[in-house]
Image (cartoon, rainbow, N blue to C red):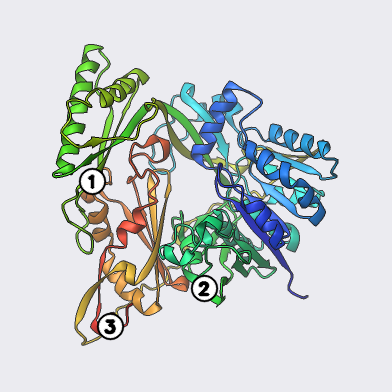
């Protein structure tokens, strides 16, 4: 049987992204457009909006910025569209899509997949009192819960396509499912095709963040060129699970081994046990090869049977937070900024006590631009410009309002050199925390609505997965050499990309040359990484919980650091609450290499 290919364009990586991808990918020619709008923060925002207005709670820009201007071209070209734009209200999103299609006189069939939203079952879930799957925390107060969503998989999407749907709208599914669903439909993959499902999931993982696979957030950022016109990724997937990644001709950005490898390691934990509803993926032996300019080949992944439970994410309110940024200039800028922040909290604290409001539950001061605390290869000159980020949490919005007022009120009593951008004063905002747990698949009812035709869908029941059963690759051994050893910064030897999962951060490190990897592995130990991020880790470096994984196929390492984001997402008051800059911090880490190897570095 000849190998069949399908071209899939990754058109959105988050709710609110630029609308430039859709026309670009339509002009390039694709079979499918896939859109990923959802994250845990997004779900909580949509849930709050839906609570105020039952007609909203979905990604409205999918209707206004994708379908309204481009539905005619989508219909004319026969392109299928898959999007998790439904948020917490996929039915309303589907109705809006159908109304627009009718208004434009088009014959596009819309399918809506529901069943992920479990908020209506809150009482029963609370009675079962599941514990948080990572931290073991107790189930939160149900009065504070905003959303509960199980992460569905790709087979319902494939079924909707089989029913003739041109546009498939889901609520919360795993990000990669919008791509895998298309592959299952096109190639006839079954629930037992574990390696193929893992490979299609990897294709989805590479496409789900749009231009992050084509030069966005890339270590070698200058190679991306004109990012104002960056190209969005196109995955050409084959029936054997292999695929290539390209971008539309004439666009900015770049597609290289580095960009694709960085995205493969982005926001994953154990690369040999990347658990999805349809399959457990093993990316450790995947090879990534440059075929030509802006064209990269990705070999198939390995897979294991689907798990028997859905990861389920609950968001709940936990008080309020607020803060702002101010800048200081001139001599001793950092000391002046710290003095200002200390006294803002001192003044606000006195007012809190006068109102019997109690102290802030958490405070944060970060002096951005102050002398580096990362040592080697980082600047330690005396900063003459510093931005101070000051923030706090409290159970009462009024207490945050006091802090924000005193931030302004201290302006005439400050050390010299204070500056700030004028505008509206910051306001208190809700703290939303994430609580993850597992829901048995049999407890979730999935329904597919294809223009009024209702179908009950029964998912693969799956089976328990035991990570201890995985065979781990042998760690890279140092090559014996009598050559003198010298140190180089990691950035000369590797690319890196970091991201978040709740209160955990991952940092993927990919060797620029396979020969570098043994030295990188030896230098980057859990202890050395803990020391570099100790000021971020709850309890400091001594309390660090860091896992280190090896991916021999990509010549890469993945670190997973626990309790390092101050709660993560909108529960955090850190400047980098999602760990996006952690890879850049790690790239200053010194690595000992033979002098002969150092001579070859550019």
- Label of residue 36 in the image: none
The CA span between labels 1 and 3 is: 36 Å
User: Going by the image, does 160 lie left or right of 516?
Assistant: right
Residue carrying label 2: 287
Counting from the top left corner in percent of width and height, residue 474 is at 38, 73
Looking at the image, residue 109 lies above or below residue 224: above
Judging depth in this view, the residue of 356 and 370 nearest the camera is: 370
- Depth-wise, is mark 1 or mark 3 nearer the camera? 1
Counting from the top left corner in percent of width and height, residue 156 is at 70, 47
Residue located at (64% from left, 24% from top): 54
Counting from the top left corner in percent of width and height, residue 35 is at 63, 49
Residue located at (31% from left, 68% from top): 490
Please identify the quadrant where the C terminus is shown.
bottom left
Residue located at (16% from left, 38% from top): 336
Query: Of helix, strand and loop, which one carries label 3?
Result: loop
Q: Which of pointers 1 and 2 lies earlier in the amino acid sequence?
A: 2
Residue 138 appears anywhere in the view? yes
Residue carrying label 1: 385
Q: Quadrant of residue 516?
A: bottom left
The CA span between labels 2 and 3 is: 27 Å
Within 10 Å of the Cα at label 1, are there few (<14), some (14-19), or many (20+) other Cα atoms?
some
- Label of residue 599 in the image: 3
Q: Residue furthest top?
A: 355
């Amino acid at each position: 049987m000849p190998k069949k290919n399908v071209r899939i364009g990754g058109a959105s990586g988050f709710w609110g992204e630029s609308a430039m991808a859709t026309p670009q990918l339509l002009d390039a020619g694709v079979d499918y457009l896939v859109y990923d709008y959802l994250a845990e923060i997004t779900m909580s925002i949509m849930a709050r909006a839906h609570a105020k207005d039952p007609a909203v709670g979905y990604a409205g820009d999918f209707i206004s910025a994708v379908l309204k201007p481009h539905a005619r071209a989508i219909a004319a070209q026969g392109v299928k569209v898959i999007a998790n734009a439904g948020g917490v209200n996929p039915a309303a999103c589907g109705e809006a899509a159908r109304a627009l299609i009718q208004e434009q006189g088009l014959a596009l069939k819309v399918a809506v997949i529901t069943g992920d939203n479990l908020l209506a079952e809150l009482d029963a879930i609370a009675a079962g009192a599941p514990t948080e799957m990572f931290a073991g925390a107790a189930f939160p107060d149900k009065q504070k819960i905003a959303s509960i969503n199980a992460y569905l998989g790709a087979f319902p999407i494939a079924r909707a396509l089989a029913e003739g749907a041109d546009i498939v709208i889901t609520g919360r599914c795993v990000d990669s499912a919008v791509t895998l669903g298309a592959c299952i439909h096109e190639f006839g993959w079954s629930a037992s095709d574990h390696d193929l499902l893992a490979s299609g999931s990897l294709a989805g993982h590479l496409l789900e963040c749009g231009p992050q696979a084509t030069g966005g957030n890339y270590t070698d950022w200058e190679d991306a060129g004109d990012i104002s016109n960056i190209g969005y990724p196109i995955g050409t997937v084959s029936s054997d699970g292999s695929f290539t990644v390209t971008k539309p001709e004439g666009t900015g950005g770049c597609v290289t081994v580095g960009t694709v490898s960085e995205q493969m390691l982005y926001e994953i934990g154990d690369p040999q046990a990347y658990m999805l509803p349809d399959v457990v993926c093993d990316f450790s032996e995947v090879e990534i090869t440059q075929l030509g300019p802006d064209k990269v080949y990705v070999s198939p992944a390995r897979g294991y049977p689907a798990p028997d439970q859905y990861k389920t994410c609950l968001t709940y309110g936990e008080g309020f937070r607020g803060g702002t940024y101010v800048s200081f200039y001139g001599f001793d800028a950092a000391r002046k900024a710290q003095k200002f922040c200390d006294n803002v909290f001192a003044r606000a604290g006195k007012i809190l006590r006068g109102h019997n409001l109690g102290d802030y539950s958490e405070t944060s001061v970060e002096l951005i631009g102050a002398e580096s605390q990362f040592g080697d290869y980082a600047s330690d000159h005396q900063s003459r410009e510093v931005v101070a980020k000051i923030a706090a949490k409290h159970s009462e919005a009024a207490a945050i309002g006091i802090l924000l007022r005193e931030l302004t009120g201290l302006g005439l009593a400050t050390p010299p050199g204070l500056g700030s951008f004028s505008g509206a004063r910051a306001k208190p905002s809700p703290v939303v925390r994430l609580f993850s747990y597992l829901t048995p698949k049999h407890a979730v009812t999935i329904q597919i609505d294809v223009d009024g035709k209702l179908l009950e869908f029964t998912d693969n029941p799956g089976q328990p997965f035991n990570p201890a059963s995985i065979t781990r690759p042998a760690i890279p051994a140092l090559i014996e050499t009598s050559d003198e050893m010298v140190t180089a910064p990691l950035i000369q030897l590797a690319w890196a990309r970091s991201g978040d999962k709740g209160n955990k951060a991952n940092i993927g490190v990919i060797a620029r040359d396979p020969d570098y990897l043994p030295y990188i592995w030896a230098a980057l130990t859990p202890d050395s990484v803990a020391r570099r991020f100790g000021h971020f880790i709850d309890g400091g470096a001594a309390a660090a919980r860091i896992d280190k994984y090896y991916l021999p196929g990509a010549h890469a390492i993945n670190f997973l650091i626990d309790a390092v984001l101050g709660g993560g997402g909108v529960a955090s008051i850190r400047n980098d609450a999602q760990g996006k800059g952690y890879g850049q911090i790690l790239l200053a880490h010194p690595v000992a290499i033979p002098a002969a190897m150092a001579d070859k570095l550019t």
